[in-house]
Amino acid sequence: MLWDPFERGCPSRLLLDRIGDRWTVLIVGALADGSRRFSELARTVDGISQKMLTQTLRSLERDGLVDRTVHPTVPPRVDYELTELGRSLTEPLAALSRWAVTHMDAVVDARDLYDAGLPGAAVGPQAERSAP
Amino acid sequence: MLWDPFERGCPSRLLLDRIGDRWTVLIVGALADGSRRFSELARTVDGISQKMLTQTLRSLERDGLVDRTVHPTVPPRVDYELTELGRSLTEPLAALSRWAVTHMDAVVDARDLYDAGLPGAAVGPQAERSAP
DNA sequence: CGGGATCCTCGTTGATACTG
DNA sequence: CAGTATCAACGAGGATCCCG
């Protein structure tokens, strides 16, 4: 079938939403180099609530990106690991993260420039005090 | 400076949010092969409201990813175009889109499997009808 | 045509508390 | 430890109207 994220109702747009999601990027990143426990993920992805962690992991599991393994020990222990499909997503997402980190400085500069330029608003030559 | 998206307050996490954003991916994708007018973008990115289009374009402009050119004609005409910085983001985002489109089928299958497996819930061997 | 400004409303998210 | 459940609330996002 033909998928097109530019189309309103297309499932691929929803999928794109999910994989570009704030937490997804970080969780998949945290799982990139091997299996991790629930609590490890919670610690690695700083600031995530258990709710969002659980919820996001469930989505990833449902979409076949993550395997969930429950060890019947006490206390309970649950391991999460990327599937083959999940590993194929690792590179694109890592590239995105790398872009953000690499170009953060440039973006900060651009913002400063933009914010500084707005108050004056007169970017072009002699735009001010022309009409009385 | 050292940027780390895994840290709670780090600006790079916010930046990652923005570039992974639903509309950003599509807008940058639409601008990937050249300058586009506002109305063209609105038509290309199916289902976006003018508010979100304007808002997202402003963010992209502020972050130095997009150039905005106003032609003083009547009726007005505004062109948007990726900057050098913006073009550097094109590939990572396109890769993400490609991943979504390419693996959509696999994800659909995984979902079907997951949804079908949940009702029974008994994945392991002989888990059912054990306790009366 | 390209927006700016408003209003309003869902949904996502985060705290909190309880369970196995 | 690893969730599930519930609740409150903030904010993203859509619809609408108006202006240059």
Image (cartoon, coloured by chain):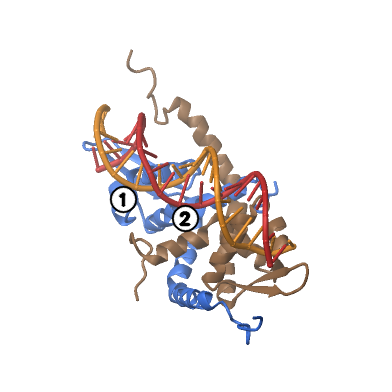
Chain colours: A blue, B brown, C orange, D red
| Count of marks placed on residues | 2
Task: Please name the amino acid that badge 2 sits on.
Answer: Arg
Instruction: Give me the chain letter of mark 1.
Output: A
Quarter of the figure that contains the C terminus of chain B: top left
Q: Do the residues labelled 2 and 1 touch (CB within 8 Å)?
A: no
In which image quadrant can residue A32 be found?
bottom left
Q: Which of marks 2 and 1 is in front?
A: 1
Instruction: Name the amino acid type tagged 1.
Output: Ala
- Quarter of the image with the N terminus of chain B in it: bottom left
Location of residue A86 in the rendering, given as x and y in whole percent from the top left corner? 48, 52
Secondary structure type for disc 2: helix
The outermost residue toward the left is A74
Name the residue that disc number 1 marks. Answer: A42
Q: Nearer the viewer, residue A66 or A14?
A: A14
Residue plotted at (73% across, 69% down): B77
Judged from this view, the residue extending furthest toward the front is A132
| SS under mark 1 | helix
Q: Which chain carries label 2?
A: A
Q: Would residue A68 be found to the left or right of residue B94 on screen?
A: left
Work out which residue is located at the far top of the displayed protein and give it: B132
Instruction: Left or right? Give the position of A52 relative to A86.
Output: left
Is residue B53 something that shows in the picture? yes
Q: Where is residue D8 in the image (x, y as percent from the top left)?
A: 35, 38
The residue that mark 2 highlights is: A87
